[in-house]
Amino acid sequence: MTITQKFRDSLQAAFYFVAAIWLIQLFQFITGIDLGGFGILPREAAGLRGILFAPLLHSGWPHLLANTPPLFFLTILLFFFYRRIAIRSFLMVYLLTGLAMWLFARDEISSSGFSHTAVHIGASGVIYGLVAFIFWTGIFRRNLKSIILALIVLFYYGSMFIGILPVQEDPNISWDGHLLGALAGIFTAFWFKNSRENDENRPTYSWEQEPEPEKQYFLERDAFEKTKAERHREREAGGNDWFSSGTW
């Protein structure tokens, strides 16, 4: 497959996913229907559906606009450079993030002295998962391509990792979703660390295929063994001659 075809396929994958999110937001905007109830309600049976639907839902246009560029770019990177595992790793990050949020995320949010039920929505958990996946894949595989991708992600998105700490000014920001998404990305990178792409396999050079030449030695390897044996025989022969001579 040519580079142009790989790039086109990667662009299509990113476009389809982002387009689906935008169409859902547009539907909510036009109809006035709030689909937030399909988000993740931690440890509630009704919240299990959020594992599938929460990343597709956003609280408004600013929320969607903030998530679109990194989601689009990271999806392209994933599908272009890790084509062999792209679908599996994306789904693994997506589902593990949602499952971890359902199990461990906050179920209440306190703001201005009031508490309300936490419903987690948005693709930011998946974004943090993709950032962590690409970065830690470079750590685990340690080949040139994966290391360069890890450095690119670190350069552009390194500042995002402040978002995994519970120090956000806005209590409605799901820092726990960010943290759990990052952990899901690390686990996925470890899981697929040995599923290397064709261009990651080190070539076997011609000199590595040649048989190793036989070692040459200055003396024969058994030279000293022969000398020892000969001396032993000489001692035995000399001893027998001395004994048979009758001299005491």
Image (cartoon, rainbow, N blue to C red):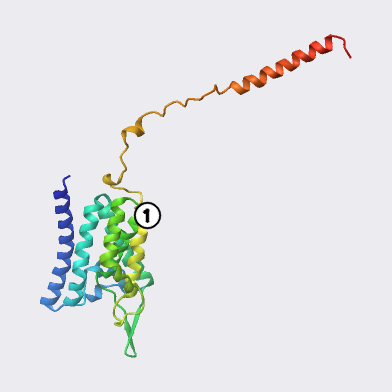
Give the answer, above or below, for where 112 lies relative to 158.
below
Element under label 1? Answer: helix
Task: Check the image and name the residue furthest to the bottom.
Answer: 113
Task: Check the image and name the residue furthest to the top.
Answer: 245
Image quadrant in which you'd find residue 51: bottom left
List x then y, in percent, for residue 140. Answer: 37, 54
The residue positioned 29% from the left and 74% from the top of the image is: 120
List x then y, in percent, for residue 22. Answer: 15, 69
The residue positioned 36% from the left and 75% from the top of the image is: 165
Which quadrant is the C terminus positioned in? top right
In-front residue for pair 118/64: 64
Answer with left or right where residue 84 lies relative to residue 215. Answer: left
In-front residue for pair 182/225: 225
Image quadrant in which you'd find residue 173: bottom left
Task: Check the image and name the residue furthest to the right.
Answer: 248
Q: How many marks?
A: 1
Answer with left or right where residue 42 lies relative to residue 245. Answer: left
List x then y, in percent, for residue 181. Answer: 32, 67
The residue positioned 18% from the left and 60% from the top of the image is: 14
Q: Can residue 214 be seen in this view?
A: yes
Which quadrant is the N terminus positioned in? top left
Q: Mark 1 points at which residue?
A: 140
Image quadrant in which you'd find residue 198: top left
The residue positioned 14% from the left and 50% from the top of the image is: 4
Q: How crowded is mark 1: few (under 14 residues within 10 Å), some or many (20 or more)?
A: some
Give the answer, above or below, for where 60 lies relative to 136.
below
List x then y, in percent, for residue 200. Answer: 29, 47
Q: Which amino acid is tagged 1?
A: Phe
Q: Is residue 51 visible?
A: no
